[in-house]
Image (cartoon, rainbow, N blue to C red):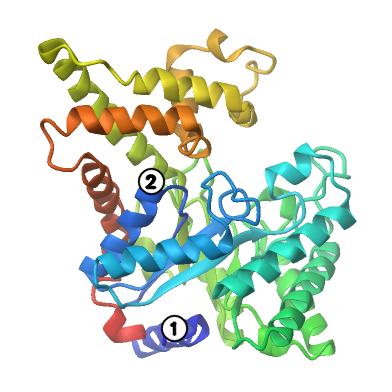
Amino acid sequence: MTKPLREVVGRILAIGEEGGLPITLLAVCPNSQAVLDAAVLSASRNRAPMLFAATLNQVDLDGGYTGWTQQSFVAAMRKCAAELAWSGPLYPCLDHGGPWLKDAHARDGLSLAESMEAVKDSLTASLEAGFQLLHIDPTVDRSLPDGCAVAIDTVVDRTVELLAHAESERQRLRLPPVDYEVGTEEVHGGLVDFTAFEHFVTRLRRELADRSLLEAWPVFIVAKVGTDLHTTTFDAATAAQLRDLVSPYGSVIKGHYTDWVGDPAAYPTSGMGGANVGPEFTAVEYEALVELALKEAKLCRDRTLPSSGFRRVLEEAVESSGRWRKWLQPGEEGLDFYDLAGDRRAWLTQTGARYVWTTPAVLAARKTLYANTSLVLPDPHQYIVDRIADAIDRYIEAFNLVDAVYRVT
């Protein structure tokens, strides 16, 4: 049986106190089948524990953009492990469980009550599927004016409400204890300066104690440690200060937006307990597919094969999704996708590709791309998986996770 994350985190804290080799746990966002395959491969060949941080956009009752429900995602994870004969610890986790953090909730104009109820349904589904970590994140409020942060006390109140629901459902389902993650790195959550962060932690602890919920105290507390979608500089001094605040409670700091971080080895040395990586692996998958498309182009010229048109099909799918609009920069608002400069369209296609990997047109083009390139590659899909796994290995090594199953699990 996989050891609960709170026990793993406890061991990580003990290693730190003993002056041993520090460890940061890696959470991969499973935004495609190739990323899932690569993460399990990396875990198995490095003998490392692996967390999977699945957002409600990716994995949910409606299938998300991956096509996976909570149940089918766990089944897919276990299938990957079985194919590799890997029995090491793999942790399915919910990422950003909170109102309006699923794009459809905002798109459909759900009220706070409606979005909270939908999130509660997703929490129950996650528990039923065997998820072992739930990130409770009510730090978005679409009813507030743009730029207005949710009050910290409101974040605490909604965190307690969702956490209490999860614990009630866990007990109703007669499931063993699960672990929790709270907080966010986002500015809209207000948890970006030390005073606000400290207030959040101390009030959350008081509220959970008052409701006899301290057994569900979070093992991970998320904070902004310098990185975001467009910034790759890690603030080790802030991370260490936050670590000192939460470690007496048995918690560790977890960073999101760790993608392309300049010095990942600074994470364990500064006491970071966990880190999420997602968009970077989409970019690696995209770049590897572009390389396959270039190989295919040469094959089509030399052997008169019908081209998959993969790059064109992918760009058209991203444009049709409309989700590229959320990354528009000042001066780009209101522009049509094809009015943007070529480098911006390429970046938006790379970043938005994860939303459309499973659309029928992209799936069909990828199938043709694989068929054509199989003339010169033994397994085109494995070629993609290996490229992503190499990128994951960079974090495994920097976070001191090689052979970590023997030290923390």
Residue 220 appears anywhere in the view = yes
377, above or below 141, in the image: above
Q: Mark 2 points at which residue?
A: 281
Screen quadrant of the C terminus: bottom left
Q: Residue at x 72, y 81 (%)?
A: 167
Please name the amino acid that badge 1 sits on. Val
Which circle's residue, 2 or 1, is located before the other in the chain?
A: 1
Screen quadrant of the N terminus: bottom left
| Crowd around label 2: few <14 · some 14–19 · many ≥20 (10 Å) | many
The x, y position of residue 154, in whole percent, is: 85, 63
The x, y position of residue 172, in whole percent, is: 74, 85
Q: Which residue is drawn at 69% across and 43% down?
A: 103
From the viewer's side, name the closer residue of 274 and 197.
274
From the viewer's side, name the closer residue of 148 and 216.
216
Q: Name the residue under label 1.
A: 8
Q: Residue at x 53, y 56 (%)?
A: 256
The x, y position of residue 219, in whole percent, is: 57, 78
What SS does tag 1 mark?
Answer: helix
Q: Is residue 320 left or right of residue 377?
A: right
From the viewer's side, name the closer residue of 305 and 249.
305
| Crowd around label 1: few <14 · some 14–19 · many ≥20 (10 Å) | some
Q: In this view, does 360 lie to the left or right of 336?
A: left
Mark 2–mark 1 distance (CA, rounded to whole Å): 25 Å
Please name the amino acid that badge 2 sits on. Phe
